[in-house]
Image (spheres, helix red, strand yellow):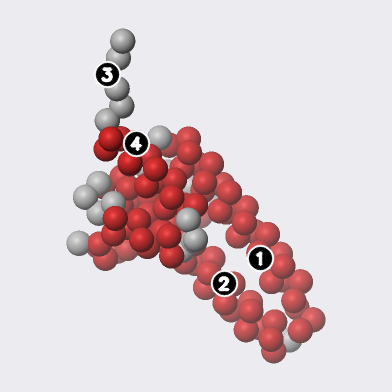
Amino acid sequence: MGAPPSGTGSNKNLYTILAWALLPPIGSLIFLFVGKDDPDVKYNAAQAVVIHGGAFAVWILLRILTIIFLPIAFLLVIWDIVWFVIWVIGLILALQAGGKRVSFPVVGPMAQQYVPMVEGWAK
C-alpha cells in the first residue's frame, strides 16, 4: 500500500480550490495570505485575485454606466454570465490541478504579468 496523503497536500489542494471558488475576489485575497508559505497556493490565489479583480472592476464600470444609461443594462447581464463562466472554468481547473499551479486559458497569460506583484502583497 502507498503512503497516506499528507495533511499539507490536501490543504494545498483545498486552498487552491477555495482561492478560485470562495467569494471572488475576496476569497482569493484571503487565501493569498493563508497560503503565503506555499508558493503554488500563493500563485493560484494571486492569479485568481488578478482575474476576478479585473472582472469585478469591469462589473463596477458597467454598473455605473447602467445607472447613467439604462438601455445598456443588457451588457451588465451579459457580463454577469461571462464572469460566471470565468468562475466555473477557474473552479474546474483548480479541481483538476490537485494543488499545483492553475494554467488559466486566454486571460491567464495576460494576468501573468501582474501575479508577481500581487504575490508580493502576502510577505
Work out whether 7 lies above or below 87.
Answer: above
Please state which amino acid type lies under the numbered disc 1: Trp
Circle 3 residue: 3
**What quarter of the picture does the C terminus occupy?**
bottom left
Q: Is residue 50 above or below residue 106?
A: below
Mark 1 and mark 3: Cα distance apart in space: 46 Å
| Mark 1 and mark 2 residues within 8 Å of each other at the beta carbon | yes
Quadrant of image for the N terminus: top left
Residue furthest bottom as drawn: 68
Q: In front: 6, or 17?
A: 6
For label 4, the crowd category at 10 Å Cα-Cα, with few meaning under 14, some 14 to 19 and many 20 or more, is few
Mark 3 vs 4: CB contact within 8 A: no
Closer to the eye: label 1 or 4:
4
Counting residues from the start of the chain, the first of labels 4 and 2 encountered is: 4
Q: Amino acid at mark 4?
A: Ser
Residue annotated with mark 2? 58
Task: Nearest to the eye among marks 1 and 3: give it.
Answer: 3
Which element is circle 4 on?
A: helix
**What's the CA distance linking mark 1 and mark 2?**
8 Å
Q: In terms of sequence position, does the residue under pointer 1 or pointer 3 come before the other?
A: 3
Name the spot of residue 112 as percent of width and height, x first. Answer: 39, 55
Residue found farthest to the right:
71
**Numbered disc in front, either 2 or 3:** 3
Circle nearer the N terminus (1, 4): 4
Label 1 neighbourhood size at 10 Å, few (<14), some (14-19), many (20+)? some
Q: Nearer the viewer, residue 110 or 12?
A: 12
Q: Is residue 40 above or below residue 54?
A: above
Residue highlighted by disc 1? 79
